[in-house]
Image (cartoon, grey):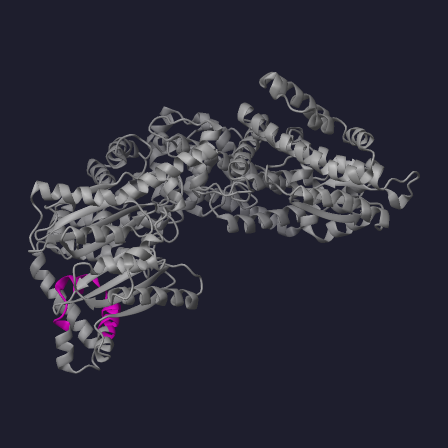
Amino acid sequence: MLGNVLETLRRESAAVLPANDKPAPKLAELIEDPAATVARLARQIGSTEALRATLVSTLRDALEEGRASAKELLARTRNGLACAKRLSATMDAVVGSLHAAATRHFYPVQNPSSGERMAVVAVGGYGRGTLAPGSDVDLLFLFPDKQTAWGESVVEAVLYPLWDLKLKVGHSVRSVDDCIREARGDMTIRTALLESRLVAGDAALFAEMVRRYGAEVVEGSAPAFTEAKLAERETRVARAGSSRYLVEPNVKDGKGGLRDLNTLFWIAKYAYRVDDPADLVEAGLFDSRELAIFQRAEEFLWRVRCWMHFITGRAEERLSFDLQRQVAAAIGYAGRNGQAPVERFMKAYFLTAKDVGDLTAIVCAALEARQQKPRATLTRLLGSLTKRKRVRALGHPDFTLKGQRLSVVDDDAFRRDPVNLLRLYEIASRDDLAIHPATSRLVTQSLRLVTAQLRNDREANRIFIEILTARRSPEAVLRRMNESGLLGRFIPDFGRVVAMMQFNMYHHYTVDEHLIRSIGILAEIDAGALEAEHPLANSIFATIANRRALYVALFLHDIAKGRPEDHSVAGARIARKLCRRFGLSEAQTETVAWLIENHLVMSTVAQSRDLGDPKTIESFAGIVQTLERLKLLLVLTVADIKAVGPGVWNGWKGQLLRTLYYETEIVLAGGHSAIERKARVELKQDALAARLSDWQPAARQAYLARHYPAYWLKVELDRQEQHARFLHQAEAAGRTTATRVETDRFRGVTELTILAPDHPRLLAIVTGACAAAGGNIVDAQIFTTSDGLVLDTIFVSRAFERDDDELRRAERIAAAIERALKGEIKIADLVAQRRAPPPRGLTFQVAPEVVIDNVLSARHTVLEVSGLDRPGLLYDLTTAISKLNLNIASAHIATFGEKAVDVFYVTDLTGAKITTTARQLIIRQALLAVFSFDHDKAQAARTKAVARA
């Protein structure tokens, strides 16, 4: 192999490099014959000590040349595997040179005894003959028996220079007996030795170890090895992220990554005794198409990983947002059809991860079939009778059971009736059956049967809707359909969003995975499994008349992502076409289209509008129009937000949605919002009064009169009681400025409540102190009392796992807020110290926008400001607003990943709206100027980053 690499290196370098840029001969010489190169160097130098020093310098140059050569090869051929092999060949030359120097020049023996034999063996990833630029180098120093003094000296002579070269070397020193004994007892060592490869030294000794490993370790232990490797994979995947569709995947250890491919081949190699993936076709494990998929996936993942290491200069395995653009550019992706280069690159990555998952299923199915043995007992006969009954219960002659898994009776079942492709999943859903992996494989191989005729077949579409709206695990069945490729082929518009990522920090999953997860959450709400978490959605679900329309709308709500036009509008248009095909009535179709076109409205209004303003409710009710639509939209919104990713949904969002629902319900039911609001305020006050039964009646009534209606409608009862006792304690202590902190592990936030006298710059001071103390504000509630105090509740993202650590941090933030409110510290200077743009400011670009609206509220002008989020942004915005001599009546803060959307209800100092065009222009320019700092800094940093690359 080294000869081939050498010849390739020479030929490629000569073909692409100018004469004066051709590589120096030392790398080529080292690869061709390390021992001869070292001998020639020794003759030129003469002294052994001088040889030691010169050798390290020579090998350092060779490593640098090898890395440069590998990087050039990667850029030119776009072949990641070739790059990894080039780096491995370079390392072979380095290790071989050190072994030759140690055994022939530093510690030579003329007539070696049996104890003076040694082999240097590459194990692990290096043993496969592939290395990434930042990979560890794993070596085994193999001896026939116990290590001798000579052997110890040689090992040190090889290792010390490798460490001097700043290489990450993992090494072990073992005899052949040690290897066999430890491989039997330790699955990690067994796996490392499985792909061992001789680099230098005694070939007969290495061959003896390989022979004994096969006879004494591998023989008869394939089932145990397979089970251990699959269990290890589950643990690893759970640690790296359990979905292969995470938008910042771990290329090495994540689901669908390189380690999955390695595991797949380890298992196949162990069970089938093959040395090359190409041999798996002859072994009957893969067909030629599947082998091509394996090889294509391996090359692509190596290409991505090598570029990640080259770009970062370290062994970076997580494909973060910061890296995705750079890797996409290095590989050469271009934008197309409304998709950015990075989005096309990540789609290719996720499709590759899906292919790896398919191949893993194939290997597991083959091994399962290989290991199954029929039981020659009476229970086998009884079992067969039971099985026949269960097969009859499947209800179709083309389906049967194999090992308690749903299968087809023969390979022609789908060709006989293509509707069987969908019928397979319908039966699996109905009877809660796992599908046999061989049958899933056959589905993938039969996708050409999914034609326009099948897509328009009434029975096929009926079956699909039954699967989608099934009360038992529709998420799991849809995911299996997606992984086999059937879902995207049957619904081509869905196929367009398969493996499509959204390049932002808000969405945790690809579009198809998000849609499937949202159906799973909807099914849980439907089944009443989330009553504690979503009491309103749970209570109204049984009263929904259009259950089928809700499932279809949720499944299709993001189906137009990645298109140039608004995905809500385009999605409604696609839905109208698909719903007719699915067999929905005209009324159901219009409901689905309306839900998709408005699927973001309820979330937007709830999080960024003043729900205590009657105009907000009236405007929203005008969009919804019917109580049925309100119910549908609430449940859809809950499922949509929860399916975005872990931690996105929280109780605060739930409270906002419930408040919006109840307020709108009154209007839609024919009531008048103001009248009903008054009655509900009184009910809320009565409930709190009952909680404060230990207070004097006069004190209780005085407290109830301090809050405006908006407070009673927005704040839940438990928090109202906390606020009441907090204010009572502060006043008893004679304090007009006070703070209170509380952690919320479930929501992942820490809550800070601030009591202070009202004044125009109050919110700016609070947000500034928070930013200066390192608190990242994710939400805020702002309320003014009738006696001139402000009760603000600030939610900051959690920084520590332990509650006591988080409480100490929160108390530091609260102390900073109190000191700022008392004028003891200068906020502007403290915030300036944290002014540097965050690293992801270089990755994401969000055009700042300011919308000034006088229609949304009857009494206030609404300022909606959106742009790239950063530490201290809210402080900068509130400071700018106060300098404009505007009063902030309420603020609504929402963060969608890297994008901040902050909404302020304001008036001028006389309490009037801002109506003049000139004044609005000044406000818009001042708020846009807040983002100019970030934009300029990011542009400068982006220019530098490109120059470094």
Say left or right for 480 vs 561.
Answer: right
Q: Is residue 281 left or right of residue 48?
A: left
Looking at the image, residue 62 sits to the left or right of residue 49; the answer is: left
Q: Is residue 547 magenta?
A: no
Nearer to the camera, 391 or 803: 803
**Identity of the residue drawn at 24% across and 32% down:** 573
Numbered range of the magenta stretch: 704-726
Horizontal and vertical percent for residue 466? 35, 41
The residue depicted at 69 percent of the width and 28 percent of the height is 27
**Residue 461 in view, yes or no:** yes
How many numbered badges does the structure rendering display? 0
Question: Is 722 covered by the magenta stretch?
Answer: yes
Question: Where is residue 453, by image quadrant?
Answer: top left
Q: Position of residue 205 (x, y in %)?
A: 83, 40
* Left or right, 474 with reference to 270: left
Q: Quadrant of the N terminus?
A: top right
Q: Nearer the viewer, residue 191 or 930?
A: 930
Q: Residue 454, percent across and down?
A: 38, 27
Relative vertical location of residue 70 with respect to residue 98 in this rendering, above or below: above
In the rendered view, would you say 171 is above or below 702? above
